[in-house]
Image (spheres, rainbow, N blue to C red):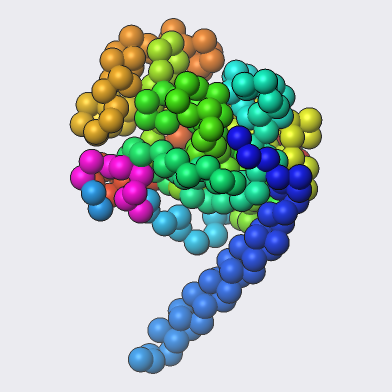
Amino acid sequence: MHHHPEGLLADLPILLAQQQHRRRLLTLSAGLLLAGCGGGGSDSDGTAATPAPSPSPSPAPAPSSCALIPEETAGPYPGDGSNSSGGQIANALALTGIVRQDMRRSIAGASGLAEGVPLTLTLQLVNANGGCANLADYAVYLWHCDREGRYSMYSSGVTGENYLRAVQVSGSDGRLSFVTIFPGCYDGRMPHMHFEVFRSSAQATSFASKIRTSQIAFPTDVCTSIYNNAAGYTTSRTNFARISFATDNVFSDGTTLQMASVSGDLTNGYQATLVVGVGG
């Protein structure tokens, strides 16, 4: 694990540049639409090297209804400064470059690549206590296991890696996106992703400032299709056959507010979306 004394603070210029880039894209899109009105002129095995589908830049309205997403355990592998690995505090939030959309490769001196079926995950943060208004400039730290079921920074063989961990900041529409892979299924848990929500990027430096911790679930038919047909998910297929939402120790009480909507295929990759209700 390679830590940087400035951590997320060193990435703040990147956030500003991303926000400016987003505004330029929206301005350009508007110009092209006006011009049109005026009459003027992958790999089949789903490895992580395959570019994932690009998130849509179109603005998303606030949903007509929402609820506070359930609080869930961060599990034993959060990498948010709340525990240790190999005798050192494990805090991916202190890594230079942790603010990134594509989270498939390790950063800060590590170079591992998480291979698997490409997945673009888009979250829309809304105020569950304020009319479901979109929450802009909030930060989300997302992490999950690789296709073998291992967590970077903790699991044997990948303790020196930090892939599949990233921070993104919501735009004015409350949305943020991650480019990643479909997670594996390890023994005893349904496939899932973990995330923590912070009120700003400046506060997303350790677990101490998080305002919500939850998990994302995935439809069983999608999991079955990927595990049965994609390269590298053999162990996941075996583990998935032994678990269900009813027996999962996190999702057994329901997944209504945590179940991602997923579309796509093995050839072109998948897209997942979820509305996340948090306190404003």
Which residue is at the front of the view, 32 or 249?
249
The image position of residue 216, as x and y in percent, is 51, 30
Nearest the camera: 94 or 126? 94
Vertical side of 258 occupied by 190: above or below: above
Residue 211 appearing in the image: no
Q: Residue at x 63, y 56 (%)?
A: 171
Dividing the picture into quadrants, the one containing residue 250 is top right
130 vs 124, left or right, is right
Residue 156, x across and y down, in percent: 47, 21
Q: Where is residue 233 in the image (x, y as percent from the top left)?
A: 29, 27
Q: In this view, does 176 lie above or below 150?
A: below
Q: Position of residue 229 (x, y in %)?
A: 21, 31
Please, what is the dominant secondary structure of the magenta stretch? loop
Kindly identify the residue that appears in the image at 23 percent across and 41 percent down.
Answer: 45
Residue at x 41% of width, y 18% of height: 186
What residue sits 62% from the left and 21% below the top?
86
Question: Bounds of the magenta span?
Answer: 44-51
Residue 238 is one of the magenta-drawn residues: no
- Of residue 61 and residue 272, the one placed in the foreground of this image is 272
Image quadrant holding the N terminus, namely top right
- Residue 269 seen anywhere in this rendered image of the structure: yes
148 left or right of 78? left
- Specify whether 43 is left or right of 130: left
In the rendered image, the quadrant that contains the C terminus is top right
Quick check: 33 above or below 236? below
The number of callouts visible is 0
